[in-house]
Amino acid sequence: MFNFIPKHTNDFEQLWALISSRNRWFISIRYTVVGAMAVFLILMQYVFGIGFDNGQIWAMTLITASLLVINIFYSFIDARGYIKNEVDKFNPLHFAFNQIVIDLLVIALMSYYSGGIESPFYFFFVFHMIIGSMILPGAVVYTLSGVSVFYIAFISVLEMLDVIQHHPFGNMLAVPLYDNVRFLIVFVTAYGIMIFVSVFLANNITSAHYRRSQELKMTLDKLSQAEKMKMKYTMGVVHEIKTPIVAVQSNLDIILGGYTGEVSKSARDRVYRARARSDEAINIINDVLNISKLKLLENLKKDDIDIVELLNTMYKKRGVQAKTAGVELRISDLRKEPKPVMADRGLFELALSNLIGNAIKYNTLGGIVETIIEERDNDTFVTVADNGIGIPDEDKDKMFREFYRSSNAKKSGVEGTGLGLSVVKEIIEHHGGSIWFKSPSRLQSEGRRGTEFTILINGEDC
């Protein structure tokens, strides 16, 4: 089987996608062409009175009907997936070549039965060769162009010598041209120059564009690999930093547990503060590790998740944090018929954990954090609302940026990296969902502006 793969091809997925889309375009446009051919026959015969004889009418009608049947067949094999994206099998490039050859045969037959060298259909050879230059290798297109020039010259000579019958273009010409040697030479020469120059220009432009797109894809792949290497390096370094901090925490816990003997109140207070600071450092490290893992993630492992069960588990984990902060945790399931959502459990839990953790962290004594589950139009919405410090209006457009923290969050004295919300956004969008927020929230009260984040996790794209 012929290999039509263009030179400089490195990304075959891009090639197959490009050629497959053009093949489908060929099929769809061919239905329009069939309709146009039928209209052409009707107009020429009954409106303009060109006067094709019955043999010409039947021949061109049969050609049009055959093209329709062939195109239906093309649609069938394309829809059934018989075209394989493999170099050594019948692939999209072979399919494109087959379609172009069939179209050229149709043009050749229509040209012959509508006047031969006097027919306007010959110009469609040029149009088709330009299209072919956008898909097939230059050598193939030049060969097809040469065959078309030879065909025109050969058929015209046979008609001029009365070896085969000439079918005039009705009564359009008072003096026939098919037997005029000078006209034949001028026409074939002009046609040959026109088609080869057109193919040369189209093929060169297309080849240059294709090479650039392949080079761009290779560059993007290299950048992606470099980004992954950077993330892996970051994870390694950050993980190594985490190890001594955990060791420090263990020693602090030993001191706080009284295993090293009695500790004065002032010393204990300082150890508590050191322990709290080490927790903040671990949280920052975990944020960096989480976003690095997310950047490296390629595939989601989706399962049915019971949101209420997941939230109860998370609330237990966050219980100590909430109790220490003096914040009440609530769950409100407003769905009439609760059903699971399809998501990657680990990532979905991480996203909700970040939202709930922030709602607790940036709240005040006596505050509330409520997670509301709703369903509208078969979509599941999960809202995490609080009545904490809220988000200033001037910071709203920047909250999902990496490393960005709102101005009042910085003033609160609570440590953070500004990575949490960017991680949440990336997770939700990775699932095909979306996230947005508003502040003040539905839980706002006097002196408590609050914030609420809403995620759509179970839409049709998820």
Image: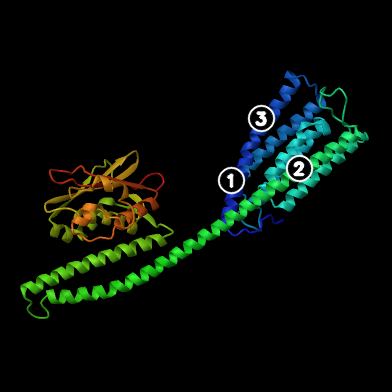
Label annotation for residue 195: 2
Viewer-proximal residue, 48 or 315? 48
Q: Are marks 3 and 2 in contact (CB under 8 Å)?
A: no
**Of pointers 3 and 1, the one earlier in the residue sequence:** 1
> Secondary structure beneath disc 2?
helix
Q: Amino acid at mark 1?
A: Ser
Circle 2 residues within 10 Å: few <14, some 14–19, many ≥20:
many
Above or below residue 253? Residue 403 is above
Circle 3 residues within 10 Å: few <14, some 14–19, many ≥20:
few
The spot of residue 255 in percent (x, y) is 13, 76
Label annotation for residue 169: none
The spot of residue 120 in percent (x, y) is 77, 31
Residue at point 34% right, 52% down? 425
Cα–Cα span, label 3 and label 1: 22 Å
Viewer-proximal residue, 306 or 358? 358
Above or below residue 27? Residue 312 is below
Above or below residue 90? Residue 257 is below
